[in-house]
Amino acid sequence: MSVKNITVAVTGMAQGFAAGARTRVASVALSADALVENVRVRLTGASDPTRAGLVQIGAEVDGRRVRVQCSAAGVGAAAERAADALRQRIADVTGPWRPRPWPWTSAAAAPAASATLPPGQARIARVKTPTLVWCSPDAAAQTMDAMDYDIHLFVDPDTETEAVVYRVGPTGYRVARTVAAGPPKDNRGIPWTLQPGAANRLTDEQAVDRLEKARLPHLFYADPDTGFGRVLYRRFDGHYGLLRPAGGLA
């Protein structure tokens, strides 16, 4: 793979770190025992090493999409951490899949920290309308791990409704649905826990209020009119993102 195949995008004052991040990621890609291509690196933050920096890397490893996202004090440190996390992610997706450890065992594995805004100032800054994939919860968990998500929204074949898998104690893997249901039928050794009952029906405004008051990283809920599942989550900048499936618009 050539270094020319790596695209680097910069947000904020992190331009001075672009070349170094590109070199680190290229070294990881070139040393991998797999085909690594379509690499995209995004740097967010300031040049000040005392301020938080965020680095996100997306790539295709033997045709499978992967992503890592790491934060640290300063963009340079975040880039080093993300390059190490990418090396581990390549090893993970090219070998037999195993449930990831819980709780988080290293800084590279931990989710990127979000900024904290004063109460009432956070707002829904971005709405995504993905087309959801029908898959078993164990397949959704594998995608969640490969893409470094804290939560993954999909359509559960057992109930034919929106559902999520997410990382939380005590085992690190929990499934929740818009309707009450039992344990996943297709279980490949994942230590599942279940969110009891159906997802709460909330407006987006009520979801923001609940997430903020409970200091949650994300919230799965159902639209009160349609019953379609949605996910509200905290962004790195302290505001919120909303996943509102393309097939489930109110």
Image (cartoon, grey):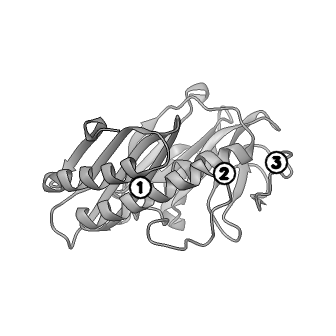
Amino acid carrying label 1: it is: Gln
- The residue labelled by disc 3 is 180
Amino acid carrying label 2: it is: Val
Q: Residue at x 45, y 50 (%)?
A: 32
- The residue labelled by disc 2 is 165
CA separation, marks 3 and 2? 15 Å
- The residue labelled by disc 1 is 69
**Of 3 and 216, the residue lying toward us:** 3
Amino acid carrying label 3: it is: Ala
The location of residue 68, given as percent across then percent down, is 44, 53
The location of residue 70, given as percent across then percent down, is 39, 60
| Residue 45 makes an appearance in the image | yes
**Numbered disc in front, either 3 or 2:** 2
Determine the residue located farthest toward the top in the rendered image: 247
Q: Earlier in the sequence, mark 1 or mark 3?
A: 1
The circle drawn on residue 160 is: none
Q: Residue at x 33, y 55 (%)?
A: 55
Q: Is residue 2 left or right of residue 105?
A: left
Q: Earlier in the sequence, mark 2 or mark 1?
A: 1
CA separation, marks 1 and 3? 32 Å
Q: Earlier in the sequence, mark 3 or mark 2?
A: 2
**Of 219 and 82, the residue lying toward us:** 82
The location of residue 225, given as percent across then percent down, is 65, 33
Quadrant of the image containing the C terminus: top right
Count of residue discs: 3
Quadrant of the image containing the N terminus: top left
Q: Residue at x 25, y 36 (%)?
A: 4
Q: Is residue 240 left or right of residue 50?
A: right
Q: Residue at x 44, y 60 (%)?
A: 85
